[in-house]
Image (spheres, grey):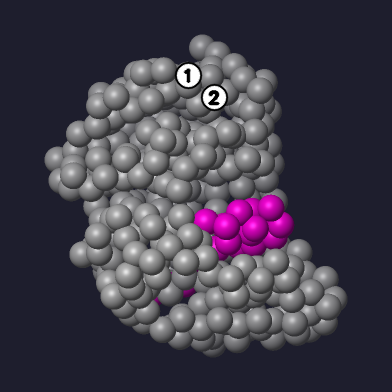
Amino acid sequence: MDPRTKKLAEVLVNHSILINKDDIIEVSCGHEAKDLALEVTRLILQKGAYPRVNCGIPGMSYTYLKYATDEQLAKRPELRIYEAKKINGTISIGTEYNTKELTGIDPKKIAIRRKATRILTEIALKKDNWVICEYPTNALAQDAEMSLQEFEDFAYKACLIDWKKQKAIQGKIKKVLDKGKEARIVGRNTDIRFLIEGRTAIPCFGERNMPDGEVFIAPVETTTEGHINYDFPCVYMGKEVDDVKLEFKQGKVIKATAAKNEKFLHEMLKMDKGAKYLGEFGIGTNFGINRFIRNILFDEKIGGTIHLALGMAYKKGGGRNNSILHWDMIKDLRNDGAVYIDGKLLEKKGKFSI
């Protein structure tokens, strides 16, 4: 076993979530993450807790979404709901084998299923004892345009960092955001602002995502004004939407264009009423992640970038926007861009001024 896999398992079990004796801890994964899943299971057992392992089958999501009727898609997953209420914590290990698997699936079918399973997310968020981790696979390596060995080095470098140091850096950013009233982001083809007054910033240092490294806050829903042009492709459900340009008025997207897959962008914005409003403003702080790889768990953490999410706001920080959609879109500030809070510079060209 790669010694870095053992170190990652220790981070997930001993840092990312809280595990007490007699807890039931769900571990979900694909077969490619066998080594990490086994090590996580061993550590859970050593704590006197009970692992509940769910191992996925490649192609299952595609098969279900392709052949299920609308009635089947809309059915509440009662057994999963029961199980979700009983478990005390969750470690979800992503093992992508084909990141474009759902590209040909009708977005409407995906939306129907998401509505039916939304309650599972709500239960997990309420318990607030979960972590999502991406295991390095050939599919992710291909998207990142790396060999598997190169991607493994990249992934472990992003995960096995000094999380105490991250916590300290993020604490400074949190203080600025918590005291702030208005945020403004400027950059190439971008000048956008929104209120954050009354909202609480959430630092993220390895407790819910792995890799991690961001501080996020929920914009006041009806206050976003201006325009933004995203530098990186906006990836959602395996589809890449390139050169996305959004214009906001009174919090709502009033114009949306893209050079590729613009129709898909418009479909997502029509998903529900909240899909056209911002649910999150995040600031990337993990400088161990220095390049875009088409995986949001990594990309939104890139040090020197910000991201704005259309749709659902996390209630923990006071956000109120409700939506099935939560689509993080990343703006690179490292070459040309800045973040201002109440007119004072917080970040310029990827460097913090605090």
Residue 6 relative to residue 324: left or right? right
Q: Are marks 1 and 2 in contact (CB under 8 Å)?
A: yes
The residue lying furthest to the top in this view is 343
What crowding class fits label 1: few (fewer than 14 Cα within 10 Å), some (14-19), or many (20 or more)? some
Image position of 206 with respect to 197: above or below: below
What crowding class fits label 2: few (fewer than 14 Cα within 10 Å), some (14-19), or many (20 or more)? many
Instruction: Look at the numbered disc 1 and give the secondary structure of its residue.
Output: loop
**Measuring 32% from the left and 39% from the top, which residue is drawn there?**
269
Q: Is 124 a magenta residue?
A: yes
**Measuring 52% from the left and 56% from the top, which residue is drawn there?**
118
Amino acid type, residue under disc 2 in the picture: Val
> Magenta span covers which residues?
118-137
Front residue of 15/68: it is 68
Amino acid type, residue under disc 1 in the picture: Thr
Q: Is 157 a magenta residue?
A: no
Q: How many marks do you count on the picture?
A: 2
Instruction: Look at the numbered disc 2 and give the secondary structure of its residue.
Output: loop
Q: Find residue 194 and report its horizontal and vertical position in percent.
A: 48, 20
**Measuring 41% from the left and 18% from the top, which residue is drawn there?**
250
Residue 90 relative to residue 302: left or right? right
Cα distance between the residues tagged 1 and 2:
6 Å
Quadrant where the image shows the C terminus: top right
The residue lying furthest to the left in this view is 259
**Measuring 36% from the left and 18% from the top, which residue is drawn there?**
249
Quadrant where the image shows the N terminus: bottom right
Q: Which residue is mark 1?
A: 223
Q: Which residue is mark 2?
A: 220
Image position of 326 with respect to 115: above or below: above
Front residue of 87/108: it is 108
